Amino acid sequence: MSFDVFGLAQPILRAVTTEGYTVPTPIQVQAIPHVMNGRDLLGCAQTGTGKTAAFALPILHRLMQAGQPQAGHPQTHKHAARGVRRIRTLILSPTRELAAQIGESFAAYGRHTGMRHTVVFGGVNQRPQVRDLQRGVDTLIATPGRLLDLINQGFIDLSTIEIFVLDEADRMLDMGFMPDIRRIIARLPQKRQTLFFSATMPPEIEKLAHAILREPEQVRIAHVKETAALIEQSVFFVPKASKPQLLTAFLSKPEITRALVFMRTKHSADRVVKQLNRAGIAAEAIHGNRSQAQRLRTLANFKSNRLRVLVATDLAARGIDVDGISHVVNFDLPVEVETYVHRIGRTGRAGATGTAVTFCAGDERKQLMLIQRLIGQKLTIEKELPAGATTVLQESAPMANESQSGGNGDNHGGVHSGVRRSGYGHSGGARSGAAHGGPVKSGRKPNGPHPSWSGTGYRGGKRRVRAKSATGR
C-alpha cells in the first residue's frame, strides 16, 4: 500500500514523498480515512507508530479542501483584526518537546499547501508566539498552560475551532493537566471534529474520551507485547553503585551509533552526563531543570548526529521522535511498568528492529519481573561485561523465584545490601552497612521483630529469614 490510496491532495503527497515516506504504518492506514471523512477518532497506539502523520496529513487535506476563510470573518478577541485567518485546528500536547515536533511535522507536510501554523508553549518569551497569532494561523499547536495564559490575555479565541486533537492524553493525566484540559474543552464549539490519542487507557482517560467524543471510530495499534517483540532486549544484573562504570563501558562499543539513556531523576542524569563527558563520550541531558532553549538545542544536536548520547528523564523524553536510535539504555528501571514499553519504543520505530538494554540492581528485580509479565517475555541475561568494565555482575538466580516480593538486594557472594521489604518501617530497606556488621537504622527504634518480618531478626549485622511456603506467605 502507498499513500496514494488515501486520496490526499497532491501538494501533501509531494511533501510526503520528499520526506521519504513510501508505505504508511498501520495506524496511518486505519486512521487517515476516518479523519478525512470528518469522523471523531479514538486512537490507542504506542510511541513510534507514526501517530503524528496519522492526524496531520488528513487535517491538512481537510483544511485545503475547505479553502481559505473569507476575508472579514468576524473575530471575537480584542487583539484580532478583521480579515486575519481564524484558528481552525487546535492540537494539545503535554510537553514542549512534543509540541515543537508536531509543529515540525506540520511544516514538513504542509510546505506546499499554503496552510499556516504556530506552536505556543511556556518557558520562552511569548512575543514571537503572539506575533504569529496576530498574523493569523490555521493550526495552533499548544501546551495547556501557555494556551490558557494567552486566552486569558485575549490573544487566542477558540470559538472558530473545527478540529480538536488531544495528543498523549495519558501523559496529560500523569502531569496533572486534567483541570486545564477541561477548561479548554469548555471553550470549544460543540460542533467540531475531535481526535483523541493515548498510549494507555486508564479509567479517567477513558471517561474523558467518552465525554468529548461523538460516536468515534476506534483504532488500536501495536499491543505492548507486539511492540516489545520487535526489539532485542537484554538485562545486566549489576550493583547500583557500579551502573555508571558499566554505562561508560557499554557506550564505548562502536556499534552504538546513537543512544538514548533513561534515568529516574534529573540530578542523576546530570551526574551521568559529567561522567560520560570525562570519559570522552559526547553526552547531554534533557530534563525539566533545563531551560526550554537548552532542551531544544540538545534535541537538535541529537537529531543532527552532533550528539551521540542523550540522557533523559521519562517526562522530558515523552514524545521524542528521532529516527535512527540504535540503542535504548534503561539505567534505572521505571516506576510504572508500562513506561518501559514507551522507553524502548524510541528504538525500532515504525516496525524496524532495535536494541534495548536494562541495568537491574537488586532492589529493582521485582519491577523487572512485572515488566516481563507485561511484555510476555523474559529479557536475555547478559553474562559478559563490555570491554573496559571491571565491575562484578550480580547473580541472576533470585529472579527464578517469582513469589519473592522484593528481590534479594545487591548480591556479593551471598551477602545482602540494600534489602527492600514492603511493610517495613523505613523506606529503602536495610542500610548497606548492615550487610557488613553495621547497625540497621530505620528512623525509629524497633521494639522486637516487625510484624511483616515474622521469624526474622538481626544478629551481628546479618539477617535470618524464615523459609517461605510455596504460596509465598
Image (tube, grey):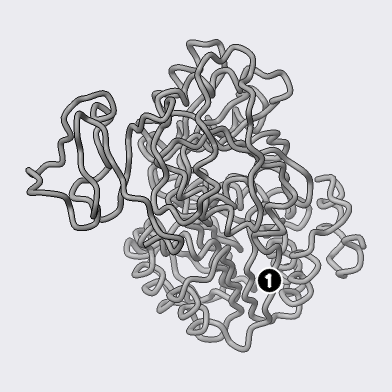
- Residue 5 in which image quadrant: bottom right
For the residue carrying disc 1, how many other residues have a C-alpha within 10 Å: few (<14), some (14-19), or many (20+)? some
Residue 155 seen in the figure: no
Q: What percent of the width, then of the height, locates residue 14?
A: 86, 53
Q: Is 239 placed above or below 249 here?
A: below
Q: Nearer the viewer, residue 70 or 59?
A: 59
Q: Is 153 placed above or below 158 here?
A: above
Q: What percent of the width, then of the height, locates residue 107?
A: 68, 49
- Residue 54 in which image quadrant: bottom right
Q: Nearer the viewer, residue 127 or 378?
A: 378
Instruction: Name the quarter where the N terminus is drawn.
Output: bottom right
SS at circle 1: strand
Residue 256 seen in the figure: yes
Q: Tell me which residue sits at (64%, 80%) in the image.
A: 40
- Residue 363 in which image quadrant: top left
Q: Nearer the viewer, residue 261 or 37?
A: 261
Q: What percent of the width, then of the height, locates residue 462?
A: 26, 32
Drawn side of residue 1 relative to residue 379, left or right = right
Q: Tell me which residue sits at (70%, 62%) in the image.
A: 222
Q: Tag 1: residue type? A: Arg
Q: Dot 1 corresponds to which residue?
A: 220
Drawn side of residue 345 relative to residue 313, left or right = right
Q: Is 435 placed above or below 227 here?
A: above
Q: Tell me which residue sits at (42%, 45%) in the image.
A: 407
Q: Tell me which residue sits at (74%, 65%) in the image.
A: 27
